[in-house]
Amino acid sequence: MAFPGALNVRSRPKRVSRGGTIAALDVGSGKVVCFIAKVDDPGSIRVVGIGHQVSRGVRAGAIVDMEQAETAIGTAVHAAETMAGEQIREVLVSLSGGQPESQTITVETAIAGQVVNDGDLKRALAQAHNLNVAPDAELIHSIPVGYTVDGSKGIREPRGMVGERLGVRLHAVTTAANPIRNLTTCIGRCHLGVEGFVLSPYASGLACLVEDEMDLGVTLIDMGGGTTSMSVFFDGKMIWCDSIPLGGGHVTNDIARGLTTPLAHAERLKTLYGSAIPTVSDEREIIDVPQVGEEEHAQANHVPKSLLVGIIQPRLEEIFELARGRLEASGIGKLAGRRVVLTGGASQLPGMRELAQQVLDKQVRTGRPLRIGGLAESVGGPAFSAAAGLLVYALQQQTELPALAPLVEQQPSGWLGRVGLWLRENL
């Protein structure tokens, strides 16, 4: 039985043998990135193809113009295929929009005094179909965050234990179904299949966070062009996520309006001269701002840098204040700890870390991909964290119990059906 409105996509990456290929596609509001990687032994991956393109037809992580988005995706994928020297058929895709919602549920299954094995864990995960998912929503992740055996809590690894009932605490994440359908259709028009979806803040966390941070508690904030998404990791697992429909593109729009300059020049000013916090020299530093509708250099318009910073800072403060509010409302503040990792393309402005520390009242560092080989310096920064994290996610699924429960099949009935289930799980 599938969830209402369930999509016909594989719920998790298929197993890839040594020398096999993994393809990741990050469709953001600011850029589209495609990574193609080879699986090496033991359990490592090496990027062999990279393509990235300015995003078109995407706003706040959702498709708003199918043709423009298709062109941007196709261009990025073609560039990666050309570099890798091979064509791909399926991609693992990141999700930055769709209004993700988190909830923690507990499911149980009878084990009748037997030793817990992988089959018992899979059956318990399959019972996530009891989750009450709205018709217009889609289950994206069901991540085991804890286990119980006969009511005993705090169990991290139940396999090999004996009991009557096995319980699994799941972090279930759902998103709006229609943005996923539109994105799937758009990718399909590029003659590609969707191997699965992974939330951007989850993927970015897998790429940027070190193991101690994941275990002790950390908040990851992924600042993209159209959205700022957040995730909290504790005890090695993602336990909460959320998204704010504001990002670096909104800062650019504010600059364009405030200084009456074209969007392309506003982005250039932000990149070259922008800062999240003011400095004492801002009043003395003068920048040239081209005006909308005027011929270039027809009339000089010089403004102090302080005016530019005065436009950027309030919007960034708003984003961090909203993030703080969402964290406080989630009720997991203690588990999130006092550590924040900033990543994403919009996190690279000077002073961003200091401003985040002031607003969030936490220790902040900037995160970049840590676990991927073959990344050049130009594509190894915070802007490429989500794409790199998709590869890490795919690699983890090769050796671990699925973090993402299947969009569930009906449980077999009858003696022959149960025998068939046992054969599938144990042979």
Image: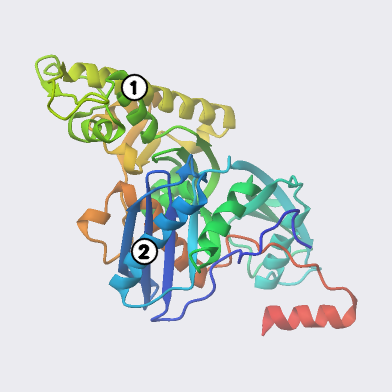
On the picture, is 218 further left or further right than 119? left
User: Looking at the image, is mark 2 or mark 1 earlier in the sequence?
Assistant: 2
Residue 229, x across and y down, in percent: 47, 40
The residue drawn where x is 43% and y is 70% is 22
The residue drawn where x is 73% and y is 47% is 133
Residue 74, x across and y down, in percent: 41, 62
- State whether residue 173 appears in this view: no
- Image quarter of the N terminus: bottom right
The residue drawn where x is 65% and y is 61% is 405
Write down the quadrant of residue 81 in the picture: bottom left
**Colour scheme in use:** rainbow
Write down the quadrant of residue 19 in the picture: bottom left
| Along the viewing direction, whichever of 63 and 279 lies nearer the viewer | 63
Residue 101, x across and y down, in percent: 62, 41
Write down the quadrant of residue 370 in the picture: bottom left
- State whether residue 205 appears in this view: yes
In this figure, which residue is indicated by the disc labeled 2? Answer: 35
Residue furthest to the right: 414
Q: CA distance from mark 2 to mark 1?
A: 35 Å
- Image quarter of the C terminus: bottom right
